[in-house]
Image: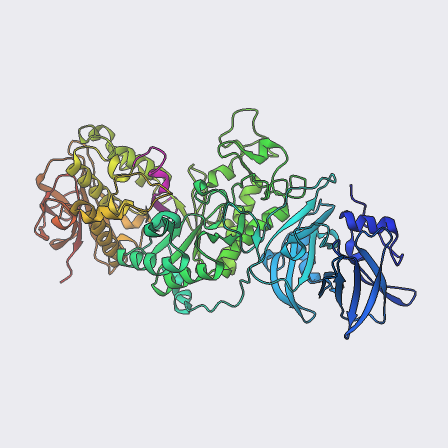
Amino acid sequence: MTDTPAKYPQLPPSYETAQKIASGVLADPFAVLGPHEADGQVWVTAFDPGAMSMAAVMDGDEHPLAAVDGGIGVFCGPVPARKPYRLRGRNAAGETWENEDPYRFGQVIGEMDEYLLAEGTHQRVWQVLGAHVMQHEGVPGTHFAVWAPNAHRVSVVCDYNSWDGRRNPMRLRGSTGVWEIFLPGLAEGAPYKYEIIGAQGQLMAQKADPVGFGSQHPPETASVVRDITGYGWDDGKWMKHRAVENAHDAPISIYEVHLGSWKRKVDEGNRPLSYKEAAVELVQYVSDMGFTHIEFLPLSEFPFDGSWGYQPVGLFAPTVRHGPPHEFRDLIDAAHQARIGVILDWVPGHFPTDVHGLSQFDGTALYEHADPREGFHQDWNTAIYNYGRIEVANFLISNALYWLEEYHVDGLRVDAVASMLYRDYSRKDGEWIPNKDGGRENYEAIAMLQRTNEICYGEVPGIMTAAEESTSFPGVSKPVDAGGLGFGFKWNMGWMNDTLDYIERDPIHRRHHHHQMTFGIHYAFSENFILPISHDEVVHGKGSMINKMPGLEGEKFANLRAYYGFMWGHPGKKLLFMGCEIAQWAEWNNNAQIDWAATEYKTHEGVQRLVRDLNTLYRGTPSLYVKDCEPGGFEWLESNDMDNSVYAWLRRGGPDDPEAVVICNFTPIERSGYRVGLPHAGKWREALNTDAEIYGGEGRGNLGEITAENTAWHGQDASASMTLPPLSTIILVRDES
């Protein structure tokens, strides 16, 4: 057990105090080590277990420090004045060395930062905590600060001190629970950890920095000093207008990417792309495909590849798997210069229990709940954050702001929100603790999410947040002041489940499940929805998108093309996981790249071309996106033709935008002479037909246009008789010429 903080007026220190220094259990090392005055005399006390002798060097003069009895590496002696000095040591072999004394430097954290940290309201904790390369009192080095309020001692361990926790114990900053130290001469690139003596006097496993900006490459687990200042951004034009690109009335089509497996350098050991390579190859591809945004599966540092990043340890560190922080900025900068937004998956719902991570960080349940009924996630064997602890909530909120401010990220998609909202999520009776009112809602998590959205939208103009929320929790994308959670968008998981269940069925049975495709409209405008076909739908035995489709090979491709047409014509922003756009046969495998060779075949290349053209049509047709989140932008033309499995609807934009009409035929039977109501007589352009030969179809349709006549139908003043190819979607746009 360490001793309690105390004053040490005795100089030289007593042998008992020297033993505590040498054994690394002195609670307040700055009270003894470094320069101190007693009776008008300045004394310097130093510790170096490898030294046989030690001297303080001032202005070139050497002032010997006497060894405290016992030869345990503690030295103390008088010096002429209290001014800068260096320590010169000599070992038994006669070797000498000279270095700055960390204990001669004053505090770095200021009073206002200390106050805000203690209050749990510091919005930018990364500016204070973590490892910061700086000049302090005229000397270059790195300042370290970490929150560990129940620890008896915290030390930085690294090559600088031979990973010996006795040598650089830190200073505790009052009631903040924050420990700090400046290590002079320590530069960027140095790996480090924190060695902690816990609340019960136990020596903990060495911990990575919760606010570290870099990490070693897994399976190594140390944090790495990274200077994240001074990047020269070239995305000013994008940043000024991105609010328009992220708005509810914007065309938002998201390409979801697992960067580790999008493309690999097969001839270089099958390695993944670097951030700099992705800044060229991925950005060019996404731009060519017409997507408006890239969404990355989590890129904050994580120890296990198989978690895909959803069990992060280093929330403030871009994973080193693809390069250092500035190179991650290169990727974002390149995307912005190509007018592509960047969304990061963000995981505030849980964290892994790896010993070098947040779990039992200072010997207590600091970041997590102590009670497993609140603090352990049974589905993922992870720890759940204690959202009711203000410092923990502040840590998470600040982390969200960090990615938006420091890396110019345009949005955050928050993972597993449902698991945060409900105390009984995936738990049986008796396995959870009700809230103060006896209910299942997690008030503390709700408050944290609301505050995150308030701060992010308030501090960083033009960004967007989206929630993966799988229940019917009300107001997910409503403003906080209106009682909502404050997200900009919500993933429409109900739409995804219903429509995939329908499209996977043999067409002969679809008539009995007709309204699975229409039900989503009943709630389509209750939230600001994104329609997601995400990574979760093409892994763990669920099959790839093309393999979900029924029928022979040609029918599978026709079904998939028709489904994508349905999706792009449906109200809601779009999200498609990588590989789905080329209809690869294999499930997603995070250890291998997309099956790019598939695009050598006409059917696969046709689906890829279709997705590109759907994005182009979507972005160029305001009626398909301006009112994605408003009921006034949608009207059913035909929703009840279950015998033919036909659906038709009207999309409207602004008053001057030409309307679009979407017609889907989900049977393998051509419907000739099928009449569809239209709001205007005259010519309508067949803007897209998923059965076109360029997409791998048979080229059946309406020769590029139809002419509507003044025959009322489907509640419209005009209508047209047309051909609906088998298993197809047609999108018509009113011709204004």
Residue 173 placement: quadrant: bottom right
Which residue corresponds to the image point at 45% horizontal and 38% vertical from the top-left?
A: 473
Residue 286, placed above or below residue 384: below
Q: Quadrant of the C terminus?
A: bottom left
Residue 132: in magenta span:
no
Residue 515 placement: quadrant: top left
Measuring from the top left, give residue 242's x and y in whole percent. Answer: 39, 62
Measuring from the top left, give residue 115's x and y in whole percent. Answer: 69, 57
Number of numbered discs visible in the structure rendering = 0
| Residue found at the very far front of the displayed protein | 93
Instruction: State the residue in front, 123 or 600.
Output: 600
Q: Residue 179: tell me if it is visible.
A: yes
Q: Viewed as shown, does residue 279 lie left or right of 56?
A: left
Q: Quadrant of the N terminus?
A: top right
Residue 505 placement: quadrant: top left
Query: The magenta stretch spans which residues?
Result: 526-543
Which residue corresponds to the image point at 60% horizontal and 51% vertical from the top-left?
A: 209
Which residue corresponds to the image point at 65% horizontal and 57% vertical from the top-left?
A: 160
Q: Residue 26: tell me if it is visible.
A: no
| Residue found at the very far bottom of the displayed protein | 59
Q: Viewed as shown, does residue 44 lie left or right of 214?
A: right
Q: Viewed as shown, does residue 417 lie left or right of 128?
A: left
